Image (cartoon, rainbow, N blue to C red):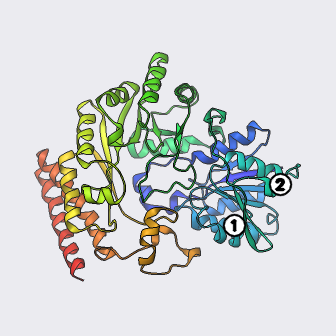
Amino acid sequence: MKVLLTHGYFIHEDPKEQEIMRPYVPLGILYISAYLEKYNYTNEIFDSTFASFEKLKAYLLDFKPDAIGIYTNLMTKLNVLKIIEYIKTTDEIKHCKVILGGPEVSNHIPNFLKYGADYIVIGEGEQTMLELVTLIDKQNIALDTIQGIAYLHNGEVCKTEARVKMKDLEDLPFPNRKKVNLQLYFDAWKQKHGTSAISINTQRGCPYSCKWCSRAVYGQSYRRRSAKSVADEIAWIQENYQVDSVWFVDDVFTVSHKWLEEFTEEITSRNITMPFECITRADRMSEAVILNLKKSGCFRVWIGAESGSQKIIDLMDRRVEVGQVRTMIQLAQSHGIQAGTFIMVGYPGETEEDIYETVHHLKVSNPDIFTITVAYPIKGTPLYTEVENNFIADLPWETSTDRDIDFKRTYKRKYYDYAVSMIINDVNAFKARKNGLLMRFSKLKLKSVAAKGAMWAYKLA
């Protein structure tokens, strides 16, 4: 039986990522690949990141898989639909069973099934994919006994009983990294940043309640691999690759202080420290936590804030104090760790005053780096439910994603594009002036003033 895994992301189609150039292979399909092999199902991975749709089509025709598992998220949805259509309209491969998983599928089940997907995996994929492959391989297993799937029967959507989340993550083998050419990623990183990076996952789920965040795959839970297992994976990476740093993809790396202490002891006692960056929350940080991060190799910590306005943070149900965020950014920096943060504008209820509170917050906290985006509602999240009746247009599902959804905000949508420009330029002008870079300060300040003027125009429009 031939099994193929892919994800449908092509970096050449993504100008923003080409500019940023921080690509990572989706760990999900690498975990599924390893899990299938653990149970004696060989498989192949077509890593589309540095390929093209034409190359994927050629590979499909050559390999002729009996089953294909496709990781699907907001960024890849439209390409996934193209892949499904190609498979189902091409005689040589239309026998192939299409299995979709990932964060995008569980809230759009009827649409994906009616578009041609054979099975939807709801939640974690390893055990479910193994059972579906066993079924397709005509082993003794009944479709309706497979937990956590959806499929069509006589034109109607059928959903089986929800699969219980995997309790012991130690049952998972390491991601099957040897199935993809990671050197392509390392080279892309080196060319853009001078250093390379590799991703590792230590936990599944997030116990917090932020209204804009999707929990479609791992749920509102907290499950973690042992510190020893993570240290073993770092050691394996060091033995098999020449790579400079690790990106821990966990939602809240320091959620457990006890685990962090164990991790720090594990890697330092074994002398397998590798520089890493991670994401966390200010309320799960302290000086002791920062010292353990530093000792274990952390060179950059991302501390979520999303806004400088406490009113907006509370509307998001972030359950964190903006002052605490500022303190932890500065404390991390005082111990030699770079601090990054995330900012979101255009959240329901946000006013111009809140936006300028965010500018103030960034100037006071002075993170080394920050990213900024305009809020959009992801189906299945509380934010989506809150604004669903205020959508501005009914977009065709087949040609749009949730990123395209606009809703009635305090100001028109274009206002927030200029707000993003204003924040970036105003904060960076502040940094330039602080560092004595007067020419740079002048240029950035002019851009900030121009953006403010555009904000004013769209505010009155």
Residue kind at label 1, given as amino acid type = Ile
Judged from the image, the secondary structure of the residue bearing numbered disc 2 is helix
Residue 304 location, x and y as percent?
Answer: 35, 48
Query: Can residue 345 be seen here?
Result: yes
- The CA distance from mark 2 to mark 1 is 18 Å
Which residue is at a point 49% across and 49% down the rendered structure image? Answer: 23
Judged from the image, the secondary structure of the residue bearing numbered disc 1 is helix
Which residue is at a point 33% across and 60% down the rendered structure image? Answer: 315
Q: Quadrant of the C terminus?
A: bottom left
The quadrant holding residue 235 is: top right
Residue kind at label 2, given as amino acid type = Ile
- Residues packed near mark 1 inside 10 Å, few (<14), some (14 to 19) or many (20 plus): many
> Foreground residue, 261 or 433?
261
Q: Which residue is mark 1?
A: 84
Q: Farthest top residue? A: 269
Residue 133 location, x and y as percent?
Answer: 79, 50
Query: Can residue 65 be seen here?
Result: no
Badge 2 vs badge 1, beta-carbon distance below 8 Å = no
| In front: label 2 or label 1 | 2
Q: Farthest bottom residue? A: 461
Which residue is at a point 27% across and 39% down the rendered structure image? Answer: 328
* Residue 257, above or below 384: above
The quadrant holding residue 223 is: top right
> Foreground residue, 166 or 248?
166
Residue 156 location, x and y as percent?
Answer: 75, 72
Q: Which residue is mark 2?
A: 136
Circle number at residue 334:
none
Residue 429 location, x and y as percent?
Answer: 17, 54
